[in-house]
Structure formats: C-alpha cells, structure tokens
Image (cartoon, helix red, strand yellow):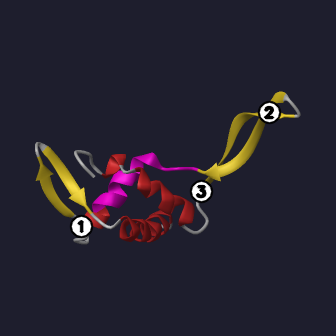
Amino acid sequence: MIGVGHDNNTSIHLPEYRAPDPPMKECGVPWLVNGKREWITFPDVNLRERYTGAAGQAFEEEGNVTIGQVAGATCRLMSQKCLVDFAVEWFDAFRNR
C-alpha cells in the first residue's frame, strides 16, 4: 500500500465474506426482468468498514508488515494472502467478543 493506511485497504473486506457466519443485511438493486426494470433484493454480508483499520493494525502488530518510504509516502509491504487469512480469524474472534 502506498500512502494509505489499512482503513483504505479494501482487500480486508474479503475476509468478512470468508469468516464463518458473517452478519448479513438485505440489499437491493434495479434489475431488468423480461425487459422491465424491477427492484430485486438479496442477502449480502454487512461489511463493517469502520473495523478494517483495526484488523490491519492487528496484522501489523504481529510483525507481518514492512513499513518504509517511497518519496513522501509511507508504504506498507505485506502478503495479501497472509493478511486475508489473518483477518478471517480476526473478524471471527472480534464478532464473538
């Protein structure tokens, strides 16, 4: 990540989908059905945007991120697979507190 923190790391939403029994919400979109626009609804994961930064910070605290500078930007180098795997467990534990 170049010049942004974990609160802007959208890859942390993937673990929310992978965590067991994620919180759900009803979503809706306009959709063409037989040539007519209709509103359809479907269940989706209720993403907790305000917690992505905390999940990323917890990952950093485990020593899994190299932080450095590129020009004037603070950068974070990490394995996205390791971050996603970590955050699946983090969200599951967080939800069960």
Foreground of the two, 38 or 88? 38
Mark 3 is surrounded, within 10 Å at the Cα level, by few (under 14), some (14 to 19) or many (20 or more) other residues, namely some
Q: Is 37 situated left or right of 51 in this image?
A: right
The residue identified by callout 2 is 32
Q: Is residue 48 magenta?
A: yes
Instruction: Residue lying at the far top in this picture: please name it.
Output: 36
Is residue 19 depicted above or below 37 in this figure?
A: below
Is residue 40 depicted above or below 81 in this figure?
A: above
Q: Are marks 1 and 3 in contact (CB under 8 Å)?
A: no
The residue identified by callout 1 is 61
Picture quadrant of residue 32: top right
Q: Residue 50: image x %, image y %?
A: 41, 47
Mark 1 is surrounded, within 10 Å at the Cα level, by few (under 14), some (14 to 19) or many (20 or more) other residues, namely few
Q: Are marks 2 and 3 in contact (CB under 8 Å)?
A: no
Is residue 28 depicted above or below 93 in this figure?
A: above
Give the number of the disc on residue 71.
none
Q: Residue 80: image x %, image y %?
A: 37, 64
The residue identified by callout 3 is 23
Q: Amino acid at mark 2?
A: Leu
Please tell me which of labels 2 and 1 falls first in the chain.
Answer: 2
Q: Residue 72: image x %, image y %?
A: 11, 42
What is the secondary structure assignment of the residue under circle 2?
strand
The residue located at (28%, 59%) in the rendering is 57
Q: Is residue 39 magenta?
A: no
Please tell me which of labels 2 and 3 falls first in the chain.
Answer: 3
What is the secondary structure assignment of the residue under circle 3?
loop
Q: Amino acid at mark 1?
A: Glu
Q: Residue 84: image x %, image y %?
A: 42, 66
What is the secondary structure assignment of the residue under circle 1?
helix
Q: Amino acid at mark 3?
A: Pro
Q: Which residues are magenta?
A: 46-57
Is residue 96 depicted above or below 75 in this figure?
A: below
